[in-house]
Amino acid sequence: MKDLEPVLKMQVVELCNKAVEAQEEERYHASNRDLHKVFALLPEPKAEWKAYTWLIASIADNYFEQDEHQDAFDKFEEVFSIDATSNDNAYLCLRRGQCALELSHEGLAKELLQKAFKLEGKELFEGEHSKYLKLAKQA
């Protein structure tokens, strides 16, 4: 993965910080607006930049929080297809699994939620609907 040149990196970091702040305030549309600005700033091929995976995962997370499960699922699929380490990220497995369940992909949902549970335990599921933990614990 490549790093951005300093001036562009400063712009990207500033926009990312605004997006994270908006996300923490549950202003998901505003967060995604800033994240899409970052996406536009990344030179082609975009997937080669360090910021790309985090960017796409953050957009996906915002979609999930807005109950836009298909959009979130599509973005999480992209993250998993370009970054092999995503399979070892409990949070990404949780969110992708949640999206899969909401879209009735129960086999994939169970696999991902069980993996998230195995990686982080039940603490990861705190604050989430109980149906996700229930599926994660199924044998």
Image: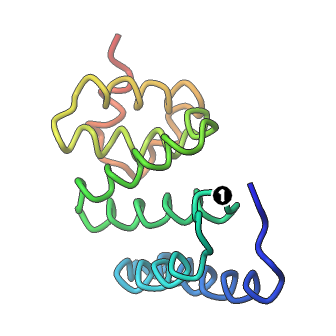
Q: Residues within 10 Å of mark 1 (few under 14, many from 20)?
A: some
Front residue of this view, candidates 5 and 124: 5
The residue sitting at 24% across, 38% down in the picture is 101
Q: Is residue 97 above or below residue 134?
A: below
Q: Is residue 53 above or below residue 116?
A: below
Q: Quadrant of the N terminus?
A: bottom right
The residue sitting at 21% across, 32% down in the picture is 105
Q: How many marks?
A: 1
Say left or right for 40 vs 138: right
Residue type highlighted by circle 1: Glu
Q: Farthest residue toward the right?
A: 6
Q: Position of residue 98 (x, y in %)?
A: 32, 43
Q: Specify the quadrant of the image occupied by residue 120.
A: top right
Q: Position of residue 48 (x, y in %)?
A: 65, 57
Q: Position of residue 110 (x, y in %)?
A: 32, 25
The residue sitting at 27% across, 59% down in the picture is 71
Q: Which residue is mark 1?
A: 48
The residue sitting at 49% across, 64% down in the picture is 58
Say left or right for 106 vs 8: left
Q: Is residue 66 above or below residue 138?
A: below
